[in-house]
């Protein structure tokens, strides 16, 4: 079962990274690093969350919400 989850992540992470690149105007390497260092990326890596079963767009929306909350939290 874990192998199937690995394969699912291997197909959706590139799609998420492309969305991050486009939304935040980042090169691929920086977008990938930003995603992996985020709480959303950590949640996707944890099979217990079941996040691997969601669409790339849904996961990207969680990432975007996380980054916006972090940005607003810093400016307060």
Image (cartoon, rainbow, N blue to C red):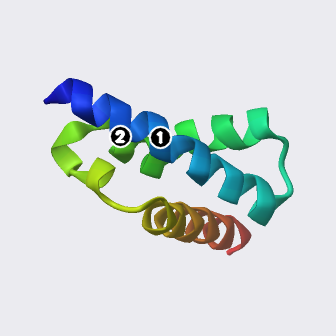
Front in this rendered view, residue 37 or 72: 37
Q: Position of residue 13 (x, y in %)?
A: 52, 43
Which SS class for mark 1? Answer: helix
Q: Position of residue 8 (x, y in %)?
A: 35, 40
Q: Residue drawn 59% across and 42% down?
A: 14
> Mark 1 to mark 2: distance in Å?
5 Å
Q: Position of residue 67 (x, y in %)?
A: 61, 62
Which SS class for mark 2? Answer: helix
Q: How many marks?
A: 2
Tell me the number on the disc at residue 75. none
Q: Are marks 1 and 2 in contact (CB under 8 Å)?
A: yes
Front in this rendered view, residue 73 or 60: 60
Q: Is residue 43 above or below residue 4?
A: below
Q: Is residue 32 above or below residue 25?
A: above
Front in this rendered view, residue 5 or 43: 5
Residue 22, quarter of picture:
bottom right
Q: To which residue does mark 1 refer?
A: 11
Q: Residues within 10 Å of mark 2 (few under 14, many from 20)?
A: some
Q: Is residue 59 left or right of residue 30?
A: left
Tell me the number on the disc at residue 8. 2
Q: Is residue 2 left or right of residue 66?
A: left
Q: Residue drawn 68% across and 66% down?
A: 71
Q: Residue drawn 21% across and 51% down?
A: 50
The quadrant of the picture occupied by the C terminus is bottom right
Q: Is residue 35 above or below residue 72?
A: above
Q: Position of residue 61 (x, y in %)?
A: 52, 70
Residue 38 appears in the rendering? yes
Q: Is residue 29 above or below residue 56?
A: above
The quadrant of the picture occupied by the N terminus is top left
Residue 37 appears in the rendering? no
Q: Residue drawn 84% across and 42% down?
A: 27
């Amino acid at each position: 079962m874990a192998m199937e989850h690995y394969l699912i992540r291997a197909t959706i992470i590139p799609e998420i990274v492309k969305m991050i690149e486009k939304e935040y105007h980042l090169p691929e390497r920086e977008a990938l690093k930003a995603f992996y260092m985020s709480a959303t990326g950590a949640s996707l890596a944890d099979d217990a969350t079941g996040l691997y079963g969601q669409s790339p767009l849904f996961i990207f929306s969680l990432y975007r919400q996380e980054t916006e909350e972090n940005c607003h939290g810093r400016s307060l």
